[in-house]
Image (cartoon, helix red, strand yellow):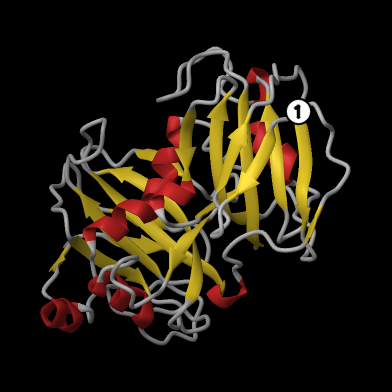
Amino acid sequence: MRKSLLSKAVTAVCATVMCLGVTACGGNSSAKSDKSNSDSSSSSEKIGMHQIAGVTAKGELGKKPTVSFKTPMTVEDNSYVVLQKGDGAQIEDGDRVCSQGIAISVKDGSELASTWEKNTPDCSTVVTSDTSQMTENYYKIFKSLKLNSTVAFGVNDSNSSGTSYLMVLTLVSKSSKSKDLKKATGEKVADIPADLPKVTLAKDGKPSIDMNGYKGSDSLISQDLIKGKGAVVKDTQSVVAHYTGWLLDGTQFDSSWDRGQSSAFSLDSVIKGWKQGLAGHTVGSQVLLVVPPSLGYGNKDQEKIPANSTLVFVIDILAAY
């Protein structure tokens, strides 16, 4: 659960690019210096994507770049430019890639959002040829790049605030997707307090809940239902998880299971109840979280969640990076 609309916008740096299905090219670089986009046109012609002109980036590879262009500028959806070619490991099929992102207004060059300052990279991108999860062109982008590459993508007035902008992604790390679990694995916990909501699982691992007359708590409840045998999650990490969330009356407001895909997020970009409630648990665990309003969304409505709501989650921790 993202903690604010701004956090959602930052995460959309990756999500928007995936929807656009844009393409880019990468190359070798041994120097910690700026790389231009001058030789990426062949990839543009090959894949048929429009290349953004007039945008440059300066700075050390793998660090926050300084992006420059003349304003105001017009950008198209399905447009891109490779600003810096990375000098790190090649992106491979099946890798989970973490990206730091900046959203920059093309009207005046102002920075709309950034993950760099709080070091909250988005790790939701898995490079796969499975077209149900990633477009073919998007797959080709990442397969052609190395870590520390920086790519800018154009978004033209398609976001909720009606602002055209550049999504500037720097690929900072990767890990093998094969390490991600499909559902919680481990030992079922026997001594769960009897007054908590009751959770049952479908064969695929999807949870359902009986609130069991539960009225909530003024403090955070973080209870293992299944104890995993993986590494301990740190509050500075990014986590891959399957989850479902309910209000105290049993109304479901969100579920990654229903979307058919797990979610990845930095623990610095979610509500406090998740950051505090998941840290210290182990990968492979299933956790029941009861989040009071003070650690959730407080007195503000949030989509399907009314103000001052206590939130109940069942979360399977599939990986941590």
Asked whether, in this view, residue 272 is left or right of residue 15, the answer is: right
Where residue 318 appears, x then y in whole percent?
Answer: 63, 61
Q: Residue at x 76, y 28 (%)?
A: 220
Depicted 86 relative to depicted 30: above or below: above
Q: Is residue 124 above or below residue 145?
A: above
Tell me the quarter of the picture where residue 298 sits: top right
Front residue (pair 289, 109): 289
At x 68% / y 21%, what residue is drawn?
292
Q: Secondary structure at mark 1?
A: loop
Quadrant assignment for the C terminus: bottom right
In this orientation, does residue 61 appear?
no
Q: Position of residue 235 (x, y in %)?
A: 73, 47
Residue found 37% across the figure and 51% down from its top: 13
Q: Quadrant of residue 152?
A: bottom left
| Residue that carries the numbered disc 1 in the rendered image | 220
Label 1: how many residues lie within 10 Å, few (<14), some (14-19) or many (20+)? many
**Front residue of 186 and 115:** 186
Q: Percent from the top left, x then y, of residue 144?
A: 34, 82
| Badge 1 amino acid | Leu
315 relative to 251, above or below: below
The answer to whether 196 is drawn above or below residue 185 in the figure is above
127 or 61: nearer the viewer: 127
In the rendered image, residue 156, in percent from the top left (x then y), is placed at 17, 45
Total labels: the figure holds: 1
Q: Residue at x 19, y 81 (%)?
A: 43
Return the residue nearer the eye: 188 or 54.
188
